[in-house]
Image: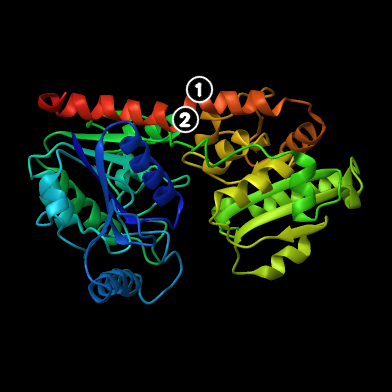
Amino acid sequence: MKVLIVNTSERTGGAAVAASRLCEALINNGVKAKMLVMHKQTKTLYVAEAGSPLSNQWHFVWERVVIWVNNLFSRANLWKVSIANTGQDITHLPEFREADVVHLHWVNQGFLSLRGIRKILQSGKPVVWTMHDMWEATAICHHAYECERFATECRDCPFLRFPSGNDLSHRTFRRKQHMLEGAGRLCFVTVSQWLAGRARQSALIGHFPITVIPNAVSLSQFHIVDRIDARTTLGVAEPYVIAFGAARIDDPIKGFSYLIGALEKLVTGDKRFQSDEVRLLLFGGIRQPELLEQLPVPYTHLGYIDDEDQLSLVYSASNVTVSSSLYETFGQTLIEAQACGSLPVSFDGSGQADIIDHLSTGYLAKRLSVESLADGIEWGLRAHIEAGQLRRSVSRRYAESVVANRYIQLYNSLAPEQA
């Protein structure tokens, strides 16, 4: 069986990491898999780049310009929506023609247009589409937050400056309906039960087959490092260490303010810990570094880390890894942390609930409660749960071979002639 994994980027972003790991896992389990991307970032032989740098930049910019103009020149929410009005046609490429199954992942920011996706769906090839956010289920937004209009018909969009009954969301909703008309062997995959529930509510895709397969983690790349050795390497002397990471730490959806509030409760409010007992390890980009001045504990900002050995050091050094996101479709950092023996602490109510067995393999705080998040961090800092127990939990559920074989079963069900 030949499978083509399609994603905008090879390495940048959670979806790219998940898609790359899956491609490698499929190859390691006997599948002839290739990856097709708009932005290739390594010299990996099984990854192909589509389009030229100039055309890719044009598609990327043109989509943003159209959104900006339709939003009456407001930049608010410019990166929270995508309309796929422009992009590439990949159906003529040899990688596409050779594939028995086409597996779409995150294809936004100018890679595939709605017209291009329709050509893929009309090609006769089985298509699996893994959702890493809500865009497939909505008209234009990547996360609907509290909006439920996607369950009936998107219009009056809260992400637009002047929402109306025939605004950009409604027009794109109609185009997506046309894109999906007559789609043959199409199956959507969500990375968590929470996201599956949202997808099944969608007026656009709720009638298609939807299954849940989580992201994988490489247990050979993420490994347990002796905690004392890890802390020595990172220059950490405090007895309690907390990790927090994201592609962009201060992205509002990551809830950094909730982490600040929880830490304030722990060291200045309830004074459960002395401030000099706790070290916060931060990794990822940040646009507003002045926010770090609000932290009530010493911190180390390690910047963006794209190296599994370095990440393993950070997780292994940490008693707790916190995710204070308003929503997480999955929670990749949480399984990486578990694989390295760090207890995850996160809000309940979205994809993290699939990963954490409350008070056993982590702590699920009450949704958006600073007090509950503080309780969870305290529990994690004082808990004595064997690192090997956390790693075994990850191995059973998220090892690359486990996830790859679930996808292989799905591919075979869509293309029985290849079984």
Q: Does residue 414 appear to the left or right of 330 in the view shown?
A: left
Q: Residue at x 71, y 49 (%)?
A: 259
Decide if residue 362 is in sight here: yes
The Cα–Cα distance between marks 1 and 2, rounded to whole angstroms, is 7 Å
Determine contact: label 1, label 2, CB under 8 Å.
yes
Q: Residue sitting at 47 percent across and 44 percent down?
A: 146
Q: Which residue: 35% across, 70% down?
A: 71
Secondary element at image label 2? loop
The residue to which callout 2 is attached is 399
The residue under label 1 is 396
Left/right placement of residue 118 relative to residue 332 reads left
Vertical placement of residue 140 versus 345, above or below = below
Q: Amino acid at mark 1?
A: Arg
Classed neighbour count for the residue bearing mark 1: other residues with Cα under 10 Å, few (<14), some (14–19), many (≥20)? few
- Please say which color scheme the image uses: rainbow
Percent position (x, y) of residue 364?
64, 31
Q: Position of residue 406 (x, y in %)?
A: 34, 26
Res. 204 in view: no
Residue 59 vs 158, above or below: the answer is below
Q: Quadrant of residue 352?
A: top right
For the image shown, how many numbered marks are present on the structure?
2
The image shows residue 37 at horizontal and vertical percentages of 29, 57
